Image: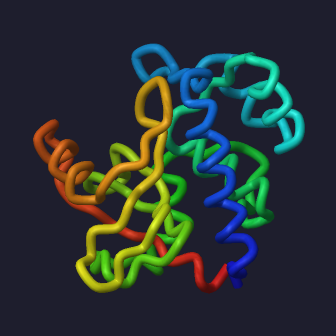
Amino acid sequence: MATVAQRQHVKHLCDVFQAHARLLLYPPHDWRTRQDATDWHLNETQLTTLLEHGQSVSFDCSETVSWMFKCVGLWPFGYAGFTGTWMDWLGKHAYTDPRQAELAVPVIFGRYPGHHMGVVYRPDPVKGNPLVAGHGRPGFDIRRLTDLAAEQAASGHPGVTFLSIAGL
């Protein structure tokens, strides 16, 4: 079961990425590079030390989320995977009501296998418009779900799916 401490740890990692957003690179043309693979295998201390010393790291959106989950002990694979990996792994625990989305829940934009992903940074059980943290370009964003969903839909990738981590 994903614990409160693990969920808070994911939020902390989002805060670290946000604080060092200028150092977070995105793979050119959305093609992963050797640097992405190398950076994904860093542990939390190694990666944060690089950032604190002004060195950049590179991930795509799903690598970012899987790296955070690896750091908190929730990622079961020895590789980064892709958005579709998340859908295959947790798809049977998917839902679409954003009011149910708790802290650190993966958010997939677009139909299977998904086009973009992030994690719930601040739930909104009343209005259903949580803040979502993610890395879909150089930098790191924390934005409202409705804004991200509209942007993704406008680019041809409608739909939002939340993946429950309660059973992990």
Q: Residue 146, relative to residue 29: is it above or below?
A: below
Q: Position of residue 13 (x, y in %)?
A: 67, 51
Q: Position of residue 61 (x, y in %)?
A: 49, 40
Residue at 68% over, 19% down: 56
Q: Residue 46, relative to residue 111: is it above or below?
A: above
Residue at 79% over, 27% down: 52
Question: Which one is in front, 159 or 13?
Answer: 13
Image quarter of the C terminus: bottom right
Residue at 67% over, 68% down: 8
Residue at 27% over, 76% down: 128
Q: Residue 154, relative to residue 91: is it above or below?
A: above
- Residue farthest toward the left in the current orientation of the protein: 154
Q: Residue 116, relative to residue 166: is it above or below?
A: above
Q: Position of residue 87 (x, y in %)?
A: 46, 62
Image quarter of the N terminus: bottom right
Quadrant hosting residue 29: top left
- On the picture, is 44 further left or further right than 8? right
- On the picture, is 6 further left or further right than 60? right
Q: Position of residue 53 (x, y in %)?
A: 81, 20
- On the picture, is 23 further left or further right than 46? left
